[in-house]
Structures are given as structure tokens and as C-alpha cells.
Image (cartoon, grey):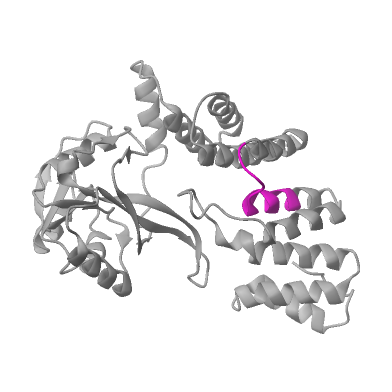
Amino acid sequence: MTLALCMIVKDEEAVLARCLESVRGVFDEIVVADTGSTDKTPEIARAFGAKVVRFPWRQDFAAARNFAFSHARSDYLMWLDADDVLAESERQKLLALKEKMDGGVDAYFLRYDAAFDAGGAVTMYFYRERIVRREAGFRWAGAVHETIAVSGKTVRADIAVTHRKGPHRERGRNLKIFARLFADGTKPDARQKYYFARELESSGLYDAAAAAFEWFLRGDGWREDKIGACRELARCHAACGRQRERLAALLKSFDYAPPRPEICCDLGALFAERHDLHTAIFWYKLAVNSRDAAESGAFVCPDHRDYIPYLGLCVCYDRLGMHERARRFNALAKKCKPYDAACLHNEQYFDSVLGGGRGAN
């Protein structure tokens, strides 16, 4: 079986070589759809043996990705963004997977490591449809935050793609695309409603974002997106000083699933801010004992299972004057992140005269 890499790019000279170097020797063909670069992006792509095809940009990421797919002739098609890379261990895993491909699998889901802490540990990951069988005819959908609705036999592969952000992108680009879609009379589906709300939130338009999240929650949608919307709606209310609505949004997530670690940590933080430390402790402890969404394909933030609740418990117990217990929870948090500045500060604090100094972070 042959495997192609299909990409869409524009002005990616700062990161494209890094991406293509990280997958050197894996693919039988590379197709790069350029949407209007004015830098050396096309030349860099060709230097790695890529077929560069021009795609006149029309504010539609799905159309661009479908165009790139249409120019590949391999049995399987994989996509990457220019600011993605594969570690050498993951490149070797991908080569091994390629050797096993026999056409019996329609789509492979790969892990996407999307955020990292100061020590390089993954703080957010999720699984995405990453490799598809060309003859299955799957199509990208969604002008922004595009996705492929795969079917048939799917496999989750133990391979991680790492997202390493490149230069700052055009601010508000995705909101402009949504605005054009709505102006043209396009009726958004549930997923587009959710991501429209997220774009508003990331732009600091919290009141508008809150209204959009509520719009999404009133309709249909994937359960995991509903849970995510509750968290983000709570953040919007917090930014606007609406604490009762913030609590209600977090509790609404229980309509969709048992408490997730992320929700429990958010509730712990809320009650800690209220100085209701015993209730905060309840939620932080529940976070440690709750199941995350790793198997669902949703966004997973591993720190909410251990580091964040341990540090929250450290602070709560310290404020209650239970310093030895607080010290133990700081030690647990430090075990998760030995390099963490807050844990190191707390360690020094607990080694001093307990109750003095600035207190635990």
C-alpha cells in the first residue's frame, strides 16, 4: 500500500522544512496545495520532492483540503499542517503502520499533542482522523475548523503528531470566514456553531461568545462538544463577573456525562475563589478520582487528573492551616512536574516556618 502526504499552506517558510524533514522517507508522494504564498514556501516544498499545486483561496479550508486530496494517487492519504511534526519515535511507528496497511482499514485516528507546559509535557491532546483510504471517497466539510466524517472500519493508532505553533497568524481570520458564511445565508451545523462560539471567546468577545455557546447547547451536537461548551460558557461568565451563571454552566455539564476531571477542577477553583475551601477540596479530590475523555476523542488535559487538583488541594489545606497535609499534596504535584516553579516555591515555603511567608501558590 502507498501513502501520500497532503497539505495546504500559505507563507509557511518558517516551519515547513521542519515539518517535512520530520517525515522524510515515509511518504510515496507529497502534495502541497499552496493558497497564495508570497514567500519561499513553494520552493521549500519542492526541495522535499513535493508536488506543489495552486489553489485560489476562497475562504474555505475544506475546499482547499479536498483539492489537495484530489491530486494524490496513493492508496492512503494523510494530512498534516505545516506547524506539525513527528518525533523520530513516531516517524518509525508510522513507517511500521504503513508496512501493515492492506486496504482493510478505512481510516486511522492518530493522537494530536496540541499544547505543552514549560517542561515539554503534553497538557492537551485529542485524536483526529489523520489517514484515510483514498477509494473510500471521504470528503472534508466545514469552511473553518474542517473535519472528515469517516465511516467503515476505523483504527486508533498509537502514533502522536506534535503541533508546534509557528509565527502568529492573522487575528480574527476565522471569525471573518464565519461572518462571510452567515452573510451568504449558510446555515451552520452543530459543530460550526460550537467552533464559532470558541472563536468569539478566543477573541475576547465574552458576551457574544456566551450567547453563541447557549445557542449551541440548545440544539443537537456531539456530547463531548456539549461538555466543552459548558466549560467555555463558564469561562465567559467568569470574565463578565457572572459567578452564579458560571456555576450553573459547569453543573450543566452533568446533563451529558459524569463529572470529568476538567469540570471538577473548574468547580474546585470556583469554590476556592469563594473561600469555601471544604467544598473546593471535595471537587479537587473528585477530579483525581474521575475518568477523563481519553477514549472518546475529545480534548484531554492530563494535568487535571493529578497536577492541578494536587496543587489546588495544597493551597486549600494551607489556607486552612493544615500545613503538613498541604505539603504532602505539593509533593504529589511536584512528582508530576519536578520542574514546576509553583511547586518549587511551595517546597521552599513549607521548609520555612509554616504559616509565614507568602503562602502556597
Regarding residue 179, the answer to whether it shows in the image is yes
Q: Nearer the viewer, residue 167 or 213?
A: 213
Q: Position of residue 118 (x, y in %)?
A: 52, 69
Q: Is residue 130 left or right of residue 122?
A: left
Vertical position of residue 297 compared to residue 199: above or below: below
Residue pictured at 54% horizontal, 27% vertical: 212
Look at the image and tell me in which quarter the N terminus lies.
Answer: bottom left
Q: Which residues are magenta?
A: 256-269
Q: Position of residue 96 (x, y in %)?
A: 23, 69
Q: Is residue 262 magenta?
A: yes
Instruction: Please determine whether, in this image, residue 203 is positioned above or below residue 294.
Output: above
| In this view, 319 is above or below 292 | below
Q: Residue furthest top?
A: 185
From the viewer's perspective, is residue 91 above or below residue 108? below
Query: Which quadrant of the figure contains the C terminus?
Result: bottom right
At a point 27% along the width and 60% down the height, the residue shown is 15
Q: Which image quadrant for residue 291? A: bottom right
Viewer-proximal residue among 39 and 133: 133
Q: Is residue 22 visible?
A: no
140 magenta-colored: no
Q: Main secondary structure of the magenta part?
A: helix
For residue 33, side relative to residue 172 (left or right):
left
Residue under the point 52% across and 66% down: 117
